[in-house]
Image (spheres, rainbow, N blue to C red):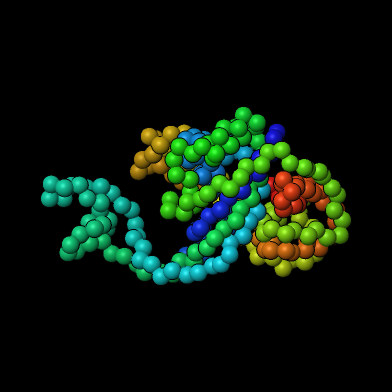
């Protein structure tokens, strides 16, 4: 197993929390499933389960949060022939039309501005090499989340200092990150249980009946989208974790840059 660290800048983002209804709340950082989708798009390996199995530790922060008041199109969109023209159709009306058109529902949407990411990837060396090449020489636009939320690769780190330590009383984390509350039978031994808890999508499968799809051509009206979720805490900026017990922690130093501390059993998604 090898480790790769990807440094990313993202001007705008919105990682929809599906458990919010009256407004569209965003997760504070990208969930694992969203990063997986970005890597599948970058490599052209859509719906590839091998990439889904890569372990990730996501660190980063956005400079600010703001709200947009937007009109959303509700329900499914299909392509139909109308007056000898192909048009997008929604709820009995054309999506775009001079007169009557499909209804929009206004809602508040929370968005993020100026994101700075370090995403650690751990997996098979050949796959990581393929990902590194795809990110350094992209053949398509790279985005994280919505298709309009493009990203810029600022650097890829492979040869860096790494060591493992046993941490007893406290752990100071500089960059915000997600930590799992549970790993197998082990619970994160936190004393200061003050951090916000999220249920983030970790993996998404697309299935036709009993068959998991592996190609875009297999997508159809009967395709089911099946997410699995992981319960995590979001640590925030410059936070100290006070511990009830000793935890193993991996320490990474990136080219005379920032130092990242990843709890070995709880920091990898």
Q: Position of residue 210 (x, y in %)?
A: 47, 35
- Furthest residue to the front? 256
Q: Position of residue 116 (x, y in %)?
A: 60, 56
Q: Position of residue 118 (x, y in %)?
A: 64, 50
Q: Is residue 71 above or below residue 95?
A: below
Q: Is residue 247 above or below residue 66?
A: above
Q: Is residue 123 left or right of residue 109?
A: right
Tell me if residue 211 can be seen.
no
Q: Is residue 234 above or below residue 269?
A: below
The image quadrant where one finds the N terminus is top right
| Front in this rendered view, residue 140 or 31 | 140
Q: Is residue 223 left or right of residue 98?
A: right
Tell me if residue 24 can be seen.
yes
Q: Residue at x 68, y 38 (%)?
A: 158
Quarter occupied by residue 100: bottom left
Q: Position of residue 220 (x, y in %)?
A: 36, 40
Q: Is residue 20 above or below residue 140?
A: below
How many marks the image carries: the answer is 0
| Front in this rendered view, residue 75 or 171 | 171
- Furthest residue to the left? 83
Q: Residue at x 84, y 47 (%)?
A: 165
Q: Residue at x 69, y 47 (%)?
A: 268
Q: Is residue 4 left or right of residue 210?
A: right
Q: Residue at x 36, y 63 (%)?
A: 72
């Amino acid at each position: 197993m090898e480790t790769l660290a990807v440094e990313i800048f993202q001007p705008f983002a919105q990682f929809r929390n599906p458990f919010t209804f009256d407004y569209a709340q965003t997760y504070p950082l990208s969930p694992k499933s969203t990063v997986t989708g970005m890597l599948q798009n970058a490599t052209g390996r859509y719906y590839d389960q091998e990439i889904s199995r890569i372990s990730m530790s996501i660190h980063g922060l956005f400079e600010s949060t703001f709200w947009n008041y937007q009109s959303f199109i509700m329900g499914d969109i299909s392509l139909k022939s109308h007056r000898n023209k192909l048009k997008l159709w929604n709820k009995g009306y054309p999506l775009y039309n001079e007169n009557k058109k499909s209804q929009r529902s206004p809602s508040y949407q929370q968005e993020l501005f100026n994101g700075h990411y370090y995403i650690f990837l751990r997996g098979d060396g050949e796959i990581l090499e393929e990902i590194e090449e795809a990110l350094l020489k992209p053949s398509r636009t790279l985005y994280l989340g919505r298709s309009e939320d493009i990203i810029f690769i600022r650097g890829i780190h492979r040869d860096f200092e790494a060591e493992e330590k046993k941490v007893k009383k406290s752990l100071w984390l500089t960059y915000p990150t997600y930590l799992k509350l549970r790993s197998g039978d082990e619970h994160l031994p936190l004393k200061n249980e003050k951090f916000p808890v999220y249920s983030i999508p970790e993996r998404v499968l697309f299935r036709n009946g009993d068959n998991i799809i592996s190609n875009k051509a297999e997508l159809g009206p009967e395709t089911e989208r099946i997410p699995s979720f992981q319960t995590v805490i979001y640590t925030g900026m410059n936070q100290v974790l006070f511990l009830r017990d000793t935890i193993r922690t991996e320490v990474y130093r990136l080219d005379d840059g920032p130092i990242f501390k990843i709890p070995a059993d709880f920091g990898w998604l």
